[in-house]
Amino acid sequence: MNVLVTGGAGYIGSHTCVAAFAAGHEITVYDNFSNSSPEALERVARIAGKRPRLVEGDIGDRAAVHALLASEKFDAVIHFAGFKAVGESVSKPWEYYNNNVSGTLVLLDEMRRAGLRNMIFSSSATVYGNPDPKNLPLREDAPLSALNPYGQTKLWLEEIMRAMAAADPAWHILLLRYFNPVGAHESGLMGEDPAGIPNNLMPYITQVAVGRLPMLTIFGDDYPTPDGTCIRDYIHVCDLAEGHVAALDKVASLPGCTAVNLGSGNGISVAQLVASFEKAIGRPLPRKVGPRRPGDAAACWADPSRALELLGWKTRRDCDAMCRDAWRWQSMNPNGYRKA
Ligand code: NAD
Ligand code: UDP
């Protein structure tokens, strides 16, 4: 298929480009590099032996999106472009609503004007809000809620696309709800490269391990979980990338708008992830236990059975692989994509 990948230079997008090339697809990346580096696409080319076509631009720039969709015929869009930092969304709500919601509305409108109605959208487990433990593992029909502007953008975009698909049966939309993507390409050439101090656990751990940060703080060990630390469903980014390839294969045969969890189905605690990482690097990590982080759910993991049923996809890589590959990336690239 000829695929347009918005945000294709980002963390998940770059890994998806590699997986999509491996499956024989053609790729055009549309990215404004607001949270990524062109170097990521150089790495895609090194791994895949093929370079995605790059069009630099913003999804909110209607004229540019129109020109792009008029320039060639795409079979599907994988839409990663958007802002994703929960904390930043609280301090910059307008920027989040504008970039994620307004930008996606422009893209959706230009897609339908171009007669392109196969859409694979990056949603998130954040749409489940702070899940009631009785709903674990989370199925796609679990109650939805937003805890912050970032989560609100995903929830609204899901609702908008659901309504558009209900009104126009030509749409085929997959709302892929990612759980906690971590890890890196096994070559060590591509990985997560957050700007500033990481908010998420795995990049924080890898930056402590490489000496960029002094110490990991575990946010709370008094949760009602077996070891007292929070439980999440970590998913290797290469499994996630392959989930998008599976979605490409199926999107045209799934009419309407369908939400699908992309997770492993396994809950892993913070303490377990840290122990796995320490095993991968062969030494203990400087760490301490601190207070709970406000707003954190005690536990959240997926029921991934719909992904298997509809997309024929499930995760293949375990927690040890996630840690090993995250460490390989960070140790080979201590400053991420920036030159030392
Ligand atoms: P990322 O920031 O690494 O990638 C996003 C890419 O989109 C970047 O390359 C950025 O430059 C680009 N971009 C942002 N706004 C743009 C715009 N207006 N026009 C064009 N390009 C733009 O993030 P990621 O981790 O790869 O996440 C990709 C998608 O998946 C996001 O929509 C995110 O909300 C969603 N998601 C991520 C996670 C996660 O933990 N990483 C979890 C659930 C959902
Ligand atoms: N976490 C932690 N220390 C950190 C960052 C995160 O203990 O420096 C914990 C956090 O409290 C949560 C888990 O790690 O329980 C996953 O956090 P992350 O931000 O990566 O994902 P999310 O909470 O959005 O699922």
Image (spheres, rainbow, N blue to C red):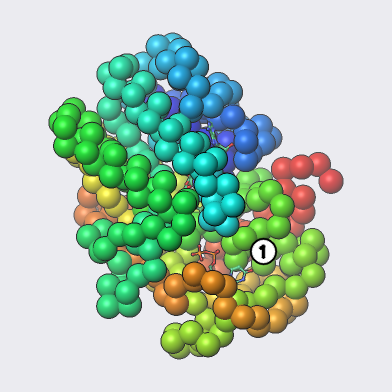
Examine the rendering and report whether any part of residue 155 can be seen: yes
Say which element carries label 1: helix
Question: Picture quarter containing residue 115?
Answer: top left
Please state which amino acid type lies under the numbered disc 1. Answer: Tyr
**Residue 275 seen anywhere in this rendered image of the structure:** no
- Residue furthest to the right in view is 340
Tell me residue 9's x, y (percent): 58, 36
Give the residue drawn at x 16%, y 32%.
167
Q: Nearer the viewer, residue 234 or 90?
A: 90
The picture quadrant where one finds residue 217 is bottom right
Circle 1 residue? 204
Position of 264 compared to 220: left or right?
left
Residue situated in front as seen by the camera: 245 or 227: 227
Determine crowd level at label 1: few under 14, some 14-19, many 20+ residues with C-alpha closer than 10 A: some
Tag count: 1
- Horizontal side, residue 212 vs residue 181: left or right: right
Where residue 272 appears, as percent x and y from the top left, is 54, 78
Q: Does any atom of ligand 2 lie closer than 8 Å to the CB of label 1?
A: yes
Q: Residue at x 28, y 44 (%)?
A: 159
Left or right position of 211 against 293: right
Percent across and percent down for residue 23 are 41, 36
Which of the 4 image quarters holds residue 140? bottom left
Q: Residue at x 36, y 53 (%)?
A: 177
